[in-house]
Amino acid sequence: MTREVWRDSAENEAASAVFHLIQELIDQYRVNRPVMPLVVAQAADAGAGGDIDGRVRQIVLQVHRANQLRRVPVKLLDAHGDTAYEAALSMVRTLAERPWETRGTSQYKPFVFPRSRLLSAIEQATATVVDQPGGGSPAERDERILEQLGSLRWRARRSGPATWWDSLRASIRPETFLGAVFIAVLSVLLGEIGWLLTALVAAAALLGLAVVRLVTTAAPPLLWLRRASRWLATTSSLAASSTAYPSDGWSWFSPSGSWRVIRARAAAVAERVADAGAGDEHARQFHLEVRVQALLEDLRHNYRPHAWDWRRSKRTVPPVVLLPTATHDNGGVLLINAINNVRSRRSEVDPLLLLASLPAAQIMRHTPPLAPEPPPHTGGRSGARARYETWVQDLSVGQSPAAAVTLAWVLRLPLSTGQLTHEHAHAQLATQRVRRTWAWWVMSRTTIAFLLVGALLGTFLWSGHWKETYCHGPLVGRNTDAVRLAGPDGGKECIGVATAPEVRFAEGNGLQLNGVGRGITFERIEQAVREQNADIGPDDEHVTIVYAGPLTGTHRSREDTRKGLEELTGVYLHQRSVNADRSVKLRVLTANGGQDMLRQTTAVEKIVEVARRDPSVVGVVGLGRNTTESTTATGLLQTAGLPVVDTTNSDSGLARAYPNYFGLAATDEEQASALGLIAGQLAETLEDPQAVVLSRKVGNEDKDRYTTEQRRVGEEMLTESGFTLTADPDSTQYSLSKDGGSANLDGPLHDICGAERVPDALYFAGRVEDVNTLMSGLGQISGCSEKEITVFTGDDLTKARFDDATKLAEKVTLYYGSLAPMSLGGGRAFYEDSRKALETLLPEGGRLDPLPTGVPPYEDKLFTSGQSVISYQATATLYAAATRSDKPQSAAETWATLYSVALNDMPTGTVTFRGTIPYADQKVHGLGVMKVTRPGPDAEIGVVCGRAAGDPVALTRKTCPLA
């Protein structure tokens, strides 16, 4: 409900009638914007006394009081000046230069008067030059006036902050729009780029604001494009005063031509202002009317439609000017006539509503006609030319209506004495506050500030969300190919593909290679791969291979990432070799599947996204750990048309299920079959051979399938070899500690070692990190420590380091399968070449130790695990399939070509998939059976038997004797 702000009684009928007329014009402006008249109220009886004139005056004052508090822009004028001209000019200046009474409570921000300010600057410059001593020709005076305008920067002096610094400080206060935005932006940047860069940005922003404010206050940038300058150059009212430069001389695209027009017109106006100051009546009328025209143009501009700030929708009431007493002497009548003349001459509707009271003795008539033909300013000319120039000078005033014509824009209200004296039954008058429109709420500085601050705050929150979601998630240019996910230890891991320089999986990882590679860190290997990628030019032919492995681990131990380090080292070694010698270069992208490859589905999804964008991606190397996600990941790559050359995943069913799967590792079934040759011979030497299978419970988020697969193949192998499985499967499973650390083997080992018959053999279906605890238990727990026990296990033991941390288990013999039978392969130059390649990654002058003499190079700890060797071969296989005749192939062509690849003289033999078919076992894998006695720092490790990669000859008891 609209709030009432004023109430009073009408003293007479005239007051009620005038009040309702004015209020109706004001209130209807929102609906249909009626034409606003110049309302002049006057007692109809010319002989009425001062009391009657006072009643008319009170009507104007009552209208003023009624509208003061209702958000109507109101101005009550009081004339001051020695002459009518000066008084009228003073009132025009008051309207344009002084705040209106409702400045603080208006519907919208205060009016602006740029055209009036420009004329004020011309007046100031003219007054300064006229007051200077010395004469000079009119041309010299015009030039001095233009110079003075330049010193004023074509702007009138006005009150405000004493310095530009004070103004700047006032602009960035928190309660201002600019200040709120400034603080909000800094808040976002603080969370985005840190406090130091934010401080630098703040300092630069303050400096930029200071420079902008200095420029805008000290110089007129783009002067010819300013609204006031454009109006001065194009208004037809001044065309007659500067015929040398017509209106069409101004152009958006012609600064110099526009500038000449502006200077010419400013000089013409200044000349007439100077003449007006000297008493020229023609010049005075011109000066007053051009001032009124500028005022009305400014008011029209303040109400113009289609403005970016929606001002027309916000201002629903007209500006109201009130003249309590208008006479010929106080300039009131002169002002009304000037407004009427400008409106009549230009035929433009402006929003100004004026209400004035005219004393009864005054006659409201047009401005008295000037002398028809003043003495011509011939300037040395005579005749027709002189008359023409005089006519041009008078044209701007002469276009006004003639004296005999009625005042078209004046609405006269003759009020009878009866109306002014008859009480109107104390009729109540009231006004309500003018509501602010929806446009004010939607398009206000406060709303925009809140929206902008809200948007910035939302951006800040989204920025934090992006930082938490993506490994590189700034406000602009975030990379979505790598995301942050919770790891098994509760920390965050960066999962996905490193396609951005900022995404570095091994950043800060100081884990070093073993053996002669000591000194080369994981971080350096990752950087070396990127350096190789960077050396590939935009015009170089290349193929892209994605290595997917466990590139991050727990925060407690960097050792968890050793598999990823060694596999990426092998990939790098082949990439370096290819890029040095081959025309088709090899680009390698790294993809992190997380600790123990427990996030490989997410990593593969990102690989697929990258491959869709980059047709040079031909396949994937890695995925060398068997989890419940391995089948899903391989299926996703199959759907995307990408082949997988797997490194060390020994799952027995992937090749049978997916035609895009090519594995270099002997499967769990193949390993168990080879170990079964030893187990069968051992069983024949024993009376009633008995065995147990000790396995890790499903853990690691229930995703690790290796131990489950190992338990299955272990049970089958021992049964087929003649052993009797004696223990309950539930009692021979162990779990990990709650923090995911050491294995809890005490319970299961006490059950096994405390049984009435201690088993002769034990198949360990666990992970390499649990072997130390197993050996310690078998060597110390009574029952097992006194008996010869043979332990069989899978290929995960190839990563074991038998050192002081492994307790002595003197009577334990350990057999495990090796996926990289390097003793049976070729490529002996690979080892020394690899050492030399890695040596280049050291700082200048750094050297790696030479390979030990007298010992096979593959027995160096840099290579013994076989991880780097197999990943090297996998990369070589995929690259060979991706290039034919020194030309890159597509992923589909690479997939098809993999079935015909054969790489001889590799470290594990001949790497090939010839003869294999989709959806069938790929029996081309290399395999070794290793024997370890005295597991501990004095362990003796030897090769029992094996077959090289690509060797079709099967292992037998004869080739794998029980030593």
Image (cartoon, rainbow, N blue to C red):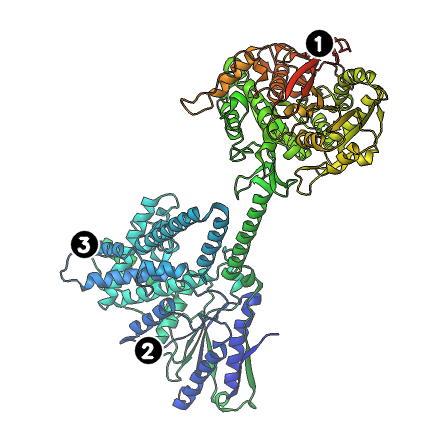
Q: Amino acid at mark 2?
A: Asn
Residue 330 shows which numbered tag? 2
Secondary element under disc 2, as helix, strand or loop, is loop
What crowding class fits label 2: few (fewer than 14 Cα within 10 Å), some (14-19), or many (20 or more)? many
Distance between the alpha carbons at the discs numbered 2 and 3: 36 Å
Q: Residues within 10 Å of mark 1 (few under 14, many from 20)?
A: some
Q: Which residue is mark 1?
A: 951
Estimate the x, y position of residue 324 in percent, counting from the top left: 40, 80
Callout 1 touching callout 3 (CB < 8 Å): no
Decide: few, some or many residues near mark 3? Use Cα within 10 Å; few <14, some 14-19, many ≥20. Answer: few
- Mark toward the viewer: 1 or 3: 1
Q: Earlier in the sequence, mark 1 or mark 2?
A: 2
Q: Position of residue 507 (x, y in %)?
A: 52, 34
> What's under tag 1, amino acid-wise?
Asp
Q: As rendered, which of 828 and 755 lies closer to the eye?
A: 755
**Image quadrant occupied by the C terminus:** top right
Between the C-alphas of marks 1 and 3, the distance is 108 Å
Q: Is residue 537 left or right of residue 633?
A: left
Q: Are marks 2 and 3 in contact (CB under 8 Å)?
A: no
Q: Is residue 242 visible?
A: no
How far across and down, in percent of the image, does residue 604 sit?
66, 31
Asked if residue 928 lies left or right of residue 227, the reply is right
Q: Secondary structure at mark 3?
A: helix
Q: Is residue 176 above or below residue 196?
A: below
Q: Which residue is mark 3?
A: 140
Asked whether the viewer can see residue 64, the reply is: yes
Look at the numbered disc 1 and give the secondary structure of its residue. Answer: loop
